Image (cartoon, rainbow, N blue to C red):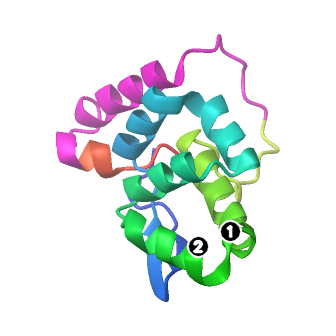
Amino acid sequence: MRLGADSILVEIGGEAFELRPSLGASMRLARRYGLKGLAKALAEFNLTIVTDMLREAAIDPRAVHQDVAAIGLGKFRDKLTAPLTQFVLGIAGVDADADNKTSVPVADPIPFERFFEQLFEVATGWLGWSPDQAWQATPE
């Protein structure tokens, strides 16, 4: 878990926005759709769920709809697929830029909601962060 993860920047409607897979956003999206649901929504470019992901990053849904109207859904999808994929990987705690050559022991899988709860407990317990700092941190 990192407090200051790298930025994922997108341009929507002529404005630059930052997508941050914060612990709070990750928990809310995982509860609503699950990680597989987010990945499927992205693959199918489900505009409702994509807009919800962007809303979690504090992007006004009206800007999304205006951008789609201005450039078309296909071009909108093309420009957002890579950053949203990085966003979903960030929710899963995957750092796409990290060197993953090290051997990590395999543990029993747990639901993502429980994973996020454990990260919150570590952040507020062991690390001594405030709840607000923990919810703003990213799980990667």
132 and 3: which one is in front? 132
86 and 56: which one is in front? 56
Magenta range is: 103-132
Q: Residue type at mark 2?
A: Val
Q: CA distance from mark 2 to mark 1?
A: 5 Å
As drawn, the label of residue 73 is 1
**Which x, y percent locates residue 60?**
36, 67
**Which x, y percent locates residue 98?**
70, 55
- Regarding residue 55, the answer to whether it shows in the image is yes
Residue located 66% across and 15% down the image: 107
Query: CB of mark 2 within 8 Å of CB of mark 1?
Result: yes
Horizontal side, residue 10 vs residue 85: left or right: left
Q: Earlier in the sequence, mark 2 or mark 1?
A: 2
**Which x, y percent locates residue 5?**
47, 60
Residue 72 occupies which quadrant of the picture?
A: bottom right
Q: Above or below — where is 24 with respect to 120?
A: below
**Which x, y percent locates residue 50?**
56, 52
Horizontal side, residue 130 vs residue 97: left or right: left
Residue located 49% across and 89% down the image: 14
Horizontal side, residue 9 vs residue 31: left or right: right
Dot 2: few (<14), some (14–19), or many (≥20) neighbours within 10 Å?
Answer: some
Residue located 49% across and 69% down the image: 65
Q: Residue furthest top?
A: 108
Please give the residue where the numbered disc 2 appears in the rendered image: 68
The magenta stretch spans residue 125: yes
The magenta stretch spans residue 107: yes
Q: Residue furthest right?
A: 101
Say which element carries label 1.
helix
Say which element carries label 2.
helix
Q: Residue type at mark 1?
A: Leu
As drawn, the label of residue 54 is none
Residue 127 occupies which quadrant of the picture?
A: top left
